[in-house]
């Protein structure tokens, strides 16, 4: 069942990334697009393109019927879902299967087991992986939840079982907040994910976000070591690194082994990431969720391991066994990724869609820019604000930071506001350079040292 043609059920930079991997494998590509995306780079690069409907994601990129119909009519044999949209949707994976097509990702059953965060916690516990103290299942009713929370002790997080992208999560530090915020969280989860189910976790303060990349072929599972993604805003990653700068070797080994054990316990097939919070003080780590798909920040792992993760996931979906043994996977040097968003960092990160009038991209040794931009491209207002990912590699972290500073200086995107100035400030920050960060660091930093208006350069173009 080797894959010879692939439909990309996504957009933006990840669609471009998948087309590149497919082309190198000699696979023909078909790109779907909404009415708002006819001019996107992936449409220009793919061998063929199919319109799947109106701009609203619910009618296009989340439209299972339209996407499966596009795959059938274009005669592809597989579908890559990218990240976000339908990538962790078991109903979609089932529909792809039922149409006789290959889904580039784990089985629908695996997605069901691990995509629901409450179920994933139970799978982790069974595999001996430590989870955050919290509820055993979904919160059945508000009274049971209150009793549970008072037993765990405030502060807690109430989280959406179907959550993603940092949404449907509320921090709660007392009884009053509990009464006020739990119904809010349920409503947000219902409207964002079509599932109002909630669960509770103890809030882990001053933690680092560390995650383990795994690859499985249904028989064996290997890990490609870890990434650190502690710099976040509204629980969304902003900056990622590999390896985690301050993780003790013993903890690194335990963490990676636990991710492999978890994935093995479900016979995992494809690329996946087990996410954890790491408490430096106690050296304890806690599993928080599994992402059963390629992640935004996968390039930092690619740069330190030399493995093309997107290529591997396509090969695995085509039936190939893992091509690497665990002992063959080595980490070399250090990689950093800055997410470049069309947002105005001087105006509370307000989204800033518009036309890219001109641009000039960084290059040189150890620099990679995964983007969907081209000069003249009109960024539509309907989707995620991610424009590209600036990723650098160098022999160690200090050198990688210097290289990132140099590359950010070369990156010019005219016509829209971007998060480049935020990253320039971070790259120069003492605490960031010393890797003294945690998941609340960036929000506190933005409060304490707001990016000065006087530094603000006019949006050129
Ligand atoms: P990663 O986990 O790869 O770092 P993000 O959490 O930033 O990536 O998610 C990538 C994209 O997918 C974002 O656009 C985010 O809003 C979206 N996303 C992630 N999980 C879900 C989900 N369960 N439902 C809907 N959108 C999601
Ligand atoms: P999502 O699916 O939206 O990515 P996650 O469960 O991965 O949700 O959590 C997103 C972020 O929220 C984490 O990276 C972390 O910063 C924060 N977070 C999640 N759970 C906890 C917790 N129990 N304690 C403290 N912070 C948490
Ligand atoms: Mg997460």
Image (spheres, rainbow, N blue to C red):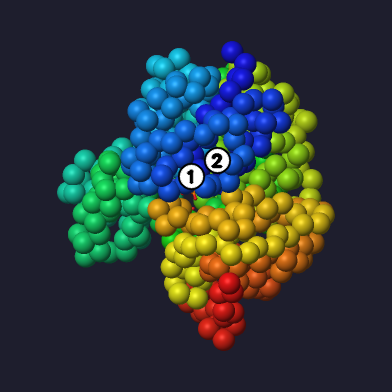
Q: Is residue 250 left or right of residue 437?
A: right
Closer to us: 72 or 406: 72
- Residue 96 x %, y %: 43, 22
Viewer-nearest residue: 248 or 193: 193
- Is 208 above or below relative to 17? below
**Residue at 63%, 64% in the rendered image:** 358
Pointer 1 local density, CA inside 10 Å: few below 14, some 14–19, many at least 20: some
Residue 10 in view in this figure: yes
The answer to which image quadrant residue 196 occupies is top left
Secondary structure of the residue carrying numbered label 2: helix
Residue drawn at (57%, 62%), measured in percent from left and top? 356
Instruction: Determine whether, in the image, residue 307 is placed left or right of residue 78.
Output: right
* Image location (x, y in percent) of residue 229: 57, 54
Disc assigned to residue 38 = 1
Closer to the camera, 57 or 123?
57
Q: Secondary structure at mark 1?
A: loop
State yes or no: discs 2 and 1 in contact (Cβ < 8 Å): yes
Locate residue 181 relative to residue 28 in the image: left or right. left
- Compared with residue 158, is residue 139 higher up or lower down, i.e. above or below? above
Earlier-in-chain disc, 2 versus 1: 1
Residue tagged 2: 43
């Amino acid at each position: 069942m080797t894959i010879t043609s692939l439909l990309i059920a996504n957009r933006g930079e990840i669609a471009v990334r998948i087309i590149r991997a497919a082309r190198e494998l000699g696979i023909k590509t078909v790109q779907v697009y909404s009415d708002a995306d006819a001019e996107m780079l992936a449409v220009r690069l793919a061998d063929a393109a199919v319109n799947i409907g109106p701009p609203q994601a619910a009618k296009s990129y989340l439209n299972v019927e339209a996407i499966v119909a596009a795959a059938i009519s274009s005669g592809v044999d597989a579908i890559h879902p990218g990240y976000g949209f339908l990538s962790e949707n078991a109903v979609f994976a089932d529909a792809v299967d039922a149409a006789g097509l290959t889904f580039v990702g784990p089985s629908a059953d695996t997605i069901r087991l691990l995509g629901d965060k409450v179920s994933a916690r139970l799978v982790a516990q069974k595999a001996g992986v430590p989870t955050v103290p919290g509820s055993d299942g979904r919160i059945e009713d508000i009274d049971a939840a209150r009793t549970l929370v008072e037993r765990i002790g405030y502060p807690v997080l109430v989280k959406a079982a179907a959550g993603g992208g940092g949404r449907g999560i509320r921090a709660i530090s007392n009884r009053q907040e509990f009464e006020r915020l739990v119904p809010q969280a349920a409503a947000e989860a219902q409207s964002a994910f079509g599932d109002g189910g909630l669960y509770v976790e103890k809030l882990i303060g001053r933690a680092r976000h560390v995650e383990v990349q795994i690859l499985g072929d249904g028989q064996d599972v290997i890990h490609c070591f870890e990434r650190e993604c502690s710099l976040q805003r509204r629980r969304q990653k902003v900056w990622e690194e590999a390896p985690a700068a301050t993780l003790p070797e013993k903890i690194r080994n335990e963490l990676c082994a636990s991710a492999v054990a978890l994935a093995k316990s479900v016979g995992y097939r494809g690329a996946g990431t087990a996410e954890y919070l790491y408490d430096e003080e106690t050296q304890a780590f806690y599993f928080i969720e599994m992402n059963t798909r390629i992640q935004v920040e996968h390039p930092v792992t690619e740069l330190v391991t030399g493995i093309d993760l997107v290529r591997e996931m396509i090969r695995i979906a085509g039936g190939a066994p893992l091509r690497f043994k665990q002992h063959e996977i080595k980490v070399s040097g250090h990689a950093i990724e800055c997410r470049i968003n069309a947002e105005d960092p001087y105006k509370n990160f307000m989204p800033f869609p518009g036309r890219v009038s001109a641009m000039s991209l960084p290059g040189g040794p150890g620099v990679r820019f995964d983007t969907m931009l081209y000069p003249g491209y009109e960024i539509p207002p309907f989707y995620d604000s991610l424009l590209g990912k600036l990723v650098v590699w160098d022999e160690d972290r200090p050198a990688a930071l210097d290289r990132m500073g140099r590359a950010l200086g070369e990156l010019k995107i005219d016509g829209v506001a971007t998060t480049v100035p935020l990253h320039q400030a971070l790259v120069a920050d003492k605490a960031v350079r010393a890797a003294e960060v945690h998941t609340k660091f960036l929000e506190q930093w933005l409060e304490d040292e707001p990016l000065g208006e006087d530094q603000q350069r006019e949006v050129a173009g």
